[in-house]
Amino acid sequence: MKQLKRIFLLSILVIIVGIGASLTLKVAIGVGAYDALAQSISYLSGIKVGTIGMILNNFCVLGQWLLLRKDFNFRHLLQVPVSILIGVVVNFVFYDVLGSITIDSYIMKLMLLFVALIVLAFALAAVMVLDVVTFPLEGFCIALAKKAKWKFVVVRQSANILSILLVLLLTFGLSLPLTLREGTIIGMLFFAPLMGYFMKRIQPILRKLELINEEVEKIEADKDSVKAV
């Protein structure tokens, strides 16, 4: 029963992540490196950005299976439905709910970006405290770091750098809209502190509800959780 409650809460949180990600895409003043890559590929291919996110995330899961083999378990496999749910939510909210809405005011865009960052930080912090599943990109970086005996932070930052380079290549090589902007920098500055703030406050609540049993390890400041949409 307890595990079912945790899975149900995880599903709600993943939906919130999808809504927050959709809002960052809608304000269109820059998203995180991995999301920017998905959006650039979406511009190039004409495929919905949520669907591109599903594909990229499931490739990350496949990469984990190739790296881990016998150590690949249900926790890793759970990333597949999580990726699909996020993608479906992003497609629905971004294209169907927000598709006809126009935001002309730059101040309004900035305000909505901060709202989206708060929503995302809260939901992702709760997911990490709940500790049912790891998001696919983080899972792949953890698996690669373990296999190659590299530091996770180095691998995760390298994934960001690679994503940024690919975005710039697609943007300037194929004249696509720029998806890395001031919003990307704002996210880099505020997202990790917001997550840390929410994790400290969410943990005792989930412990009181008996949804977690053990102390959650402290997140490293530069460990960017997101994404995957």
Image (cartoon, rainbow, N blue to C red):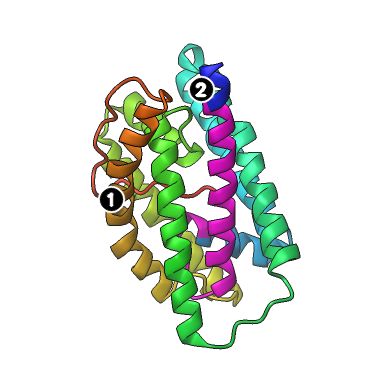
Kind of residue at badge 1: Tyr
Residue at label 1? 197
Give the numbered dot on residue 77.
Answer: none
Left or right, residue 170 beside residue 205: right
Please, is residue 187 above or below residue 16 in the view? Answer: below
Main SS category, magenta section: helix
Q: Residue at x 66, y 40 (%)?
A: 84
Q: Quadrant of residue 203?
A: top left
Q: Residue at x 61, y 32 (%)?
A: 80
Image x and y of residue 137, in percent: 47, 41
Which residue occupies the foreground of this view, 9 or 83? 9
Q: Residue furthest front?
A: 208
Give the mark toward the camera: 2 or 1. 1
Give the numbered dot on residue 75.
Answer: 2
Region rendered in magenta: 6-35
Q: Residue at x 27, y 33 (%)?
A: 150
Q: Secondary structure at mark 1?
A: helix
